[in-house]
């Protein structure tokens, strides 16, 4: 799978995806750190990459309508420790 990994995820996620033989493009490596959401989404679209992020702004389908896109998005939620 071809993946663009957002800057808000730890390097361990990148290592795990690379170990699973995914083609990985990171926001940091592509000098896209600090980019606006629409710029990052457009970059993923242009490269037809699956975007993995923790940024819930991408869940707004009015801005990032899935039926009009080439890329997809997957959200990673941090696990809470010590919560009951």
Image (cartoon, rainbow, N blue to C red):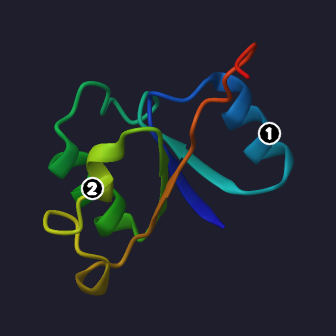
Residue under label 1, please give it. Answer: 16
Secondary structure at badge 1 equals helix
Q: Residue placed farthest to the front in the image?
A: 84
Residue at x 16%, y 37% (from the top left corner):
36
Where, quadrant-wise, is the C terminus in this rendering?
top right
Secondary structure at badge 2 equals helix
Pick the residue in front: 80 or 20: 80
Q: Is residue 23 above or below residue 84?
A: below
Q: Residue placed farthest to the right in the image?
A: 19
Residue at x 41%, y 36% (from the top left corner):
27
Relative image position of residue 42 (x, y in whole percent) = 22, 59
Q: Is residue 68 above or below residue 30?
A: below
Residue at x 41%, y 71% (from the top left corner):
48
Residue under label 2, please give it. Answer: 41
Residue at x 80%, y 39% (from the top left corner):
16
Residue 5 left/right relative to 32: right
Binning the other alpha carbons within 10 Å of mark 1 as few (below 14), some (14 to 19) or many (20 upward) gives few
Q: Are marks 2 and 1 in contact (CB under 8 Å)?
A: no
Residue 12 left/right relative to 30: right
Residue 83 occupies which quadrant of the picture? top right
Residue 68 occupies which quadrant of the picture? bottom left
Residue 25 left/right relative to 79: left
Where, quadrant-wise, is the N terminus in this rendering?
bottom right
Pick the residue in front: 20 or 58: 58
Q: Residue placed farthest to the bottom in the image?
A: 67
Relative image position of residue 58 (x, y in whole percent) = 30, 53
- Separation of marks 2 and 1 at Cα, in angstroms: 23 Å
Pick the residue in front: 41 or 62: 62
Question: Residue 37 has which mark?
Answer: none
Q: Indicate which disc, 2 or 1, sits on the residue closer to the N terminus.
A: 1
């Amino acid at each position: 799978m071809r993946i663009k990994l957002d800057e808000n995820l730890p390097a361990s996620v990148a290592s795990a995806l690379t170990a699973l033989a995914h083609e990985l493009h990171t926001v940091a490596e592509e000098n896209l750190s600090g980019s606006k959401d629409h710029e990052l989404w457009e970059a993923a679209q242009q490269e037809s990459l699956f975007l993995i992020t923790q940024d819930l702004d991408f869940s707004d389908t009015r801005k990032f309508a899935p039926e009009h896109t080439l890329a997809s998005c997957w959200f990673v939620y941090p696990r809470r420790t010590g919560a009951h």
